[in-house]
Amino acid sequence: MQVSVISDRDGLLSAAGEWTSLLEKSSGCAVSLTPEWTAAWWDNFGADNRMHLVVVRHGGALVGVAPMMEAAASYRGVHIRKITMMANGHSPVVEFVTDRAMDAEVQNAILSHLEALPGIDMIELPHLNDNGSACAPVLDYIKERGLRYGIKRGLESPYIPIDTDWETFFRSKHQKFRKAIRHKLNRAAKCGGVSVAKATIMGAADHAVEEMFSISGKSWKKKAGTDLLSDGNASGFYRSLCDALGPKGLISIWLLRKDSVPIAFEFHITHNGVVYPLRADYDESYADISPGSVLEYSIAKSLFEEARAREYYSCGHTYMYLLNWSKLTRKHVTIEIFSGNIRSTTLHIIEYKIIPCLRRLGMNKVLS
């Protein structure tokens, strides 16, 4: 195995063709593992970090890609240098891209490279599917090497298999939930002027993108400063995705309107048969007609009737409104691997020995 590193955006883009071909041969062909997504993410969230994209070849062929970066961080108030995935809360799936025929070997080569990097206190692997192709080989490597590590629970995301007809699926939901949905639909219908439309996005200049930003700026997220009008990095990221993936026909925005005024949206990327609803907001001033629920119902019904995708992956937490639609979930974890220096060893003892002990003794208030 030959391991090299790409450290700039131009190098990332030069590897895009081979990377895309490798992704088709990997165990996890998710949109957030594509070079287009990674470039868009780096442009908007890379900030002062250093790109460290690990490339693995075998006999000249690309067999592994690990979109990593070096970053300064604070861990329990201590300054550390870590190497972590190019990912954050916008990333629905995080893992190494490897040829499925040699998953373990490639991952071992990547981890061995990361472990040998000088000046690194921690290797952080966030948001790994705990039943995915990445998690088990990582833990096997750690245990074989006798490394200090810890595992933290992460996002648990509901998903809906699209493997039956709409009526069968909807009838399988709890009667109380179906009744509540029908009540909301009837209430919206009585208000009049409510319509749902799907816009196929070709680029960031599309009018529906501006409508999406406008709705977000009137949502509850405005108060928290996390709406798309206030968060420049997030808005730039969505624009970049639209420009990179829109021309490939992968992006759509579902819009709910009241008297032609856009009041709710859901932003979708459809890739490899999976629908990723990356963002959904609604105008708070229309809360009385339950715009989010009306739009959810319309989208779910359409996805089942069209039957063009095999799965709707919520990208969200186990919120009750999502669990009403499906009890199936994927659990994620963050694996932290500590280096052998004194600082890292001490932090590992504090985080995974002392703090759990104090919590068992009921000292949560002290720790918070």
Image (cartoon, helix red, strand yellow):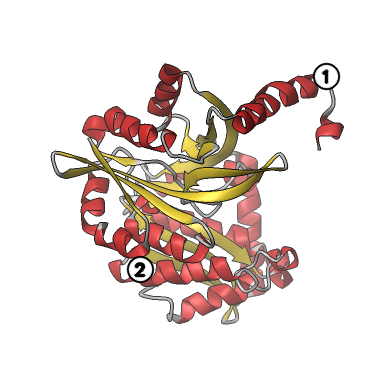
Amino acid at dot 1 = Leu
Q: Residue at x 42, y 64 (%)?
A: 40
Q: Which residue matches tag 1?
A: 361
Which of labels 1 and 2 is toward the front?
A: 1
Q: Looking at the picture, how far across and down is residue 233, in whole percent?
A: 56, 67
Residue 8's quadrant in the figure? bottom left
Split into 4 quadrants, where in the image is the C terminus? top right
Q: Is residue 257 visible?
A: no
Position of residue 25 relative to residue 351, above or below, is below
| Residue 218, visible in the rendered structure | yes
Q: Is residue 85 left or right of residue 107?
A: right
Q: Which residue is mark 2?
A: 244
Task: Classify mark 2: helix, strand or loop.
Answer: helix
Instruction: State the residue at coordinates (43%, 33%).
Output: 115
Identity, as a three-letter code, of the amino acid under mark 2 = Ala
* Above or below: residue 347 compared with residue 250: above
Secondary structure beneath dot 1 equals: loop
